[in-house]
Amino acid sequence: MRGLWRDVAGYAVFAFCTYFVLLCAFYIFFDITAKGLPVLMDKGTAFLTKSPETLVVFKDETDKIVQMPMSEYSVFRKENPGAVIRDEHTHSYSAGGIMGPLVGTALLVIVCMLVALTTGVATAIFLNEYARKGRFLNMVRLAIMNLAGVPSIVFGLFGLGVFCLWPWLPVLTHEPTESAVLVIAVPFTDGSLSFQGWGTSILAGGFTLAIMVLPVIITACEEALKAVPMGFREAAMALGATKWQAIRTAVLPYAKPGIMTASILGVTRVAGETAPIMFTAALAHKGALPWQEAKGSGLFWLSDFLTQSVQALPYHIYTVSARIPQSEYTQPMQSGSVFVFMLLVMIFAGLSIYLRGRYRKNLKW
Amino acid sequence: MNEINFEATPEPVLPTEIPVVSPAKGCGTEGREGVKSLIDIENLGFSYDLGQTETLRDISLSIPKGQVTSFIGPSGCGKSTLLRCLNRMNDLIDTAKVTRGTIRIMGQDIHAADVDPIELRKRVGMVFQKYNPFPKSIFENVAYGMRIQGVKSQKVLGEAVERALRQSALWDEVKDRLSSSALGLSGGQQQRLCIARAIAVQPEIILMDEPCSALDPIATARIEELITELKENYTIVIVTHNMQQATRVSARTAFFYLGELIEVGPTTKIFGNPSKKQTEDYVSGRFG
């Protein structure tokens, strides 16, 4: 009898813990949705297509509280010089939408994943298929594990030192700065390859995030490669394939689901990081979107575009929650941003699960 | 006392006699002398741990052209290792090393510095114990060997695939579903597909490492039938655990034990009248 009670008690404890975790998760989701959905309903798609603006709140002659974004307010003042304005106060970032941060985060994630996936998959292939067992391999694995344990703020400072400030990173520009260490004129154009560092830019932020997410990508890709049975490699090589041919045609295609899941999970991790981009890419306020500010044409435009600084969603949430005075007027922006962010993460996670399921269906062995 | 009924079933062979199993029809005569040997193995030594222990010791063996040769022996005696040496598949293992001796295929030392193992593997094909078709379509599986050599013409590939599937006795079963997944076939069909994949690149020699051990008896019988058909065009070396299979399909048999070649000769002699006591003990089932 005592054994049976122990059994029931054990089950009860495990079930309770699981349901408790689920309860916490659901509470968070529902709280965010409850606060954020009304904001989105209220502002509609303008929330996603307008950049953050300062909100002006004042009372008009009937003592009614009027809220207006700064751009509208300046027009209003110009058109109605005699209007009665009482009790005027402003709140930063509380009007408009989050288009700037959304675009910035998207660009940072794209640059990050491009860099992280190419290096990560290549490293995973080398470690799994080519490297011989021994001290070198152990050292590399130790290094990757250590990289995974570095705090994100340290990555931010590292990125600041290497990708932002170090002057030996080249930029294609028509106007090299004076602090450039080396300027090489590009023939047939009036621009130059200037070694002046990237400064606060999408490139710097993207590379910093890439290094941060590299251990996750490498580990997941290695698992995906290990899951492909050895028999495929042997069969391919017994038919006269070179090692790279065998990997490219008989291993990588079947590791794709795993690599895809890894990359999407990497995206969800990286999109929410604040510390690395705080120093390297993000600004609290940025008037225009990167493609509106870039100058030049062709490759010069691309270089200017990539060296723009941007707003970013996690940093924006930090700014409106902790760096500006709080009031009832700043609440909607906070809740809306957090809700949109959570929605994006859930969409990506759901996408990864869906894609993984679809690929798995085709590749059963 | 019961009367003995002489019309009853005939008496079984007494256990003290070694059962003589006659070779299957068409498996070739008893090791024709004077047939050109395709593979010459001389004093081969092989190790899996860079020479510390020897898995194969002083193997000397000739494999004649156009016949089926089988390697038999108890588990762990080195027959699969020797087979994998013949197409240098052991190169994939970091710590594997040929410690001494040579292997000559068609007169060429396969470990010479100027021999490309990729080219070797195109001439010496292999079929594995656990069938391993790629998760691609049947057509793509058989065409794989040619695609990696750079053949792009759909017509050439189509003809080669059909020829290979016909030779593997699989064409009639799959000709209507060449683009369906290879994993939808039964076990025996998948192994025949692997054989088709190996012969699509038209090797001279086919190495088979216990090809039927994962298959049921009916599928096994079909593969054995296939082997006797294939020997017209290819030289086949088959490793088998199943002694009866060796007698059914092969003309020559080599018996291995603990990394050494004990005896090699025509199949009827090895099973009917072996020279060495160890061989006799093994084929009569005293150990194994």
Image (cartoon, grey):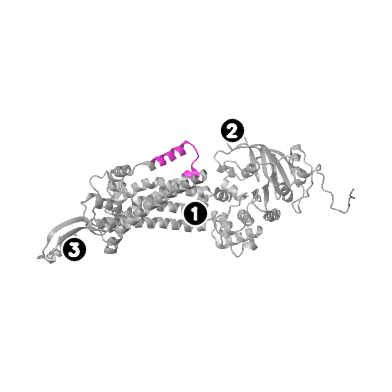
Q: Is residue A209 left or right of residue B174?
A: left
Main SS, magenta region, reads helix
Q: Quadrant of the C terminus of chain A?
A: bottom right
Q: Which residue is mark 2?
A: B52
- Image coordinates of residue A129 in percent, x first then y, are 50, 45
Q: Which mark is residue A53?
A: none
Q: Could one spot residue A309 in this view of the protein?
A: no
Measure the C-alpha gap from mark 1 to mark 2. Answer: 38 Å
> In the current view of this chain or complex, which residue is farthest to the left?
A82
To the question of a shared chain for discs 1 and 3, the answer is yes
The residue closer to the viewer here, B160 or B182, is B182
Task: Give me the disc on residue A72.
Answer: 3
Residue B162: in magenta span: no
Which quadrant of the view contains residue A298? bottom left
| Disc 1/disc 3 C-alpha distance (Å) | 54 Å
Q: Residue B274, percent across and down?
A: 77, 41
- Membership of A141 in magenta stretch: yes
Residues shaded magenta: A127-146
Question: The disc labelled 1 sits on which kind of residue?
Answer: Pro
Q: Amino acid at mark 3?
A: Glu
- Cα distance between the residues tagged 3 and 2: 85 Å
* Callout 2 crowding tier (Cα within 10 Å): few <14, some 14–19, many ≥20: few
Query: In the rendered structure, which amino acid carries the disc numbered 2?
Result: Gln
**Residue sitting at x 51%, y 49%:** A227
Lateral position of residue B171 relative to residue A44, left or right: right
> Which residue position holds label 1?
A253
Q: Determine the chain carrying the residue at label 1.
A: A
Rendered view: B96 above or below A320: above
Choose between A160 and B228: the one closer to the eye.
A160
